[in-house]
Image (spheres, helix red, strand yellow):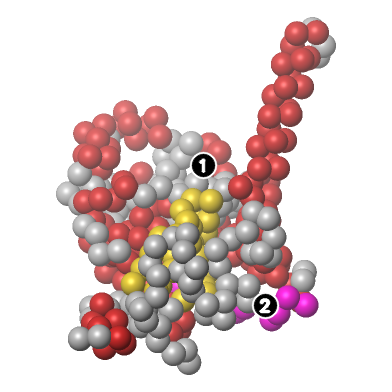
Amino acid sequence: MTGLAADAAVSDDGLVPAGLDATLVLLRHGETEYIAEGRFQGRHETPLTELGRRQAALAGARLAHPRRSPALPVPGSRPLEIVHSPLRRTTETADAVASAMVADPDDGDVPPVRPDMGMVEIGQGEWEGLHHDDIAQRYAEVLGGWRRRPTEVWAPGGESLAAVQERVRPALMSLLRNLAEGHEPGTHDRSQVAGYRGTALAGDRPWTIAVGHDGLFKVLLLTLFDLPLARFWAFSTSLCGISVIELRAGRPVLVAHNLTEHLAPLREDEARAEAEAAARSRSGAL
């Protein structure tokens, strides 16, 4: 078996369209009030903080201009769509990305923004809204089990990882099928090793942005890369961290994970504030 026929066989489980050449970008939401307060979120509605809105704006600007330094490994065209969890924090973050693209209409049409319930965060049941310390005190044994054996133990009244995967899979399948529509399949008959010419996808290949949650993205990545759910804690995404997955002739390749360089201005502001506070403390000024 050779050429496209062999490539098609790589994606025979129905999740990734056979031969798909495309890019998927994952963006986690910004800081929320619950995160700032140290509370478990799950599906509770909690808005972005002021810092979270600044994080989302910086992420949006980077995605609206992927060729600006530090460049993102994505096509130079506008994404096909922005898909997001329907919760408030992810909706606000997705809207910030779309707004950044609206501000520069010369770069192309603003992609449609659509919510998908399959992308919602893992339900944390009785833990939602509680402070980390309260959960550690009241549910110590269950919390320890969740951190060590996440496929066997989860929040009382919450979702199992198997249940999360059942809804993530069709949402991901729909997103990938949209990317495949109207595009010719690719081939593995090109360099597959980074650093060589011709490794990256053609610049006209489609891409999509998915705005979601850390827990949700853990399950999505395990599903996409056909890894066991027991590896749940293997992936972690920072607030407004960006990950890039290329689908090369139907084969997923993680080309960048948890990029946060766009948040450097916030870290510089924080460092400056800390330095000023230390200087005031040494001088005795109020």
* Residue on which the image places disc 2: 110
In this rendering, the label closer to the viewer, 1 or 2: 2
Mark 1 vs mark 2, CA separation in Å: 30 Å
Left or right of residue 110, residue 10 in this image:
left
Label 1 environment density (alpha carbons within 10 Å; few <14, some 14–19, many ≥20)? some
Residue 27 image label? none
Q: Which mark is first along the chain, 2 or 1? A: 1
* Residue on which the image places disc 1: 35
* Three-letter code, disc 1: Ile
> In the figure, 177 relative to 257: above or below?
below
> In the figure, 234 relative to 159: above or below?
above
Comparing 186 with 119, the one in front is: 186
Comparing 105 with 12, the one in front is: 12
The x, y position of residue 256, in whole percent, is 47, 56
Query: In the image, what residue occupies the spot 63% across and 72% down?
Result: 76
* Three-letter code, disc 2: Val
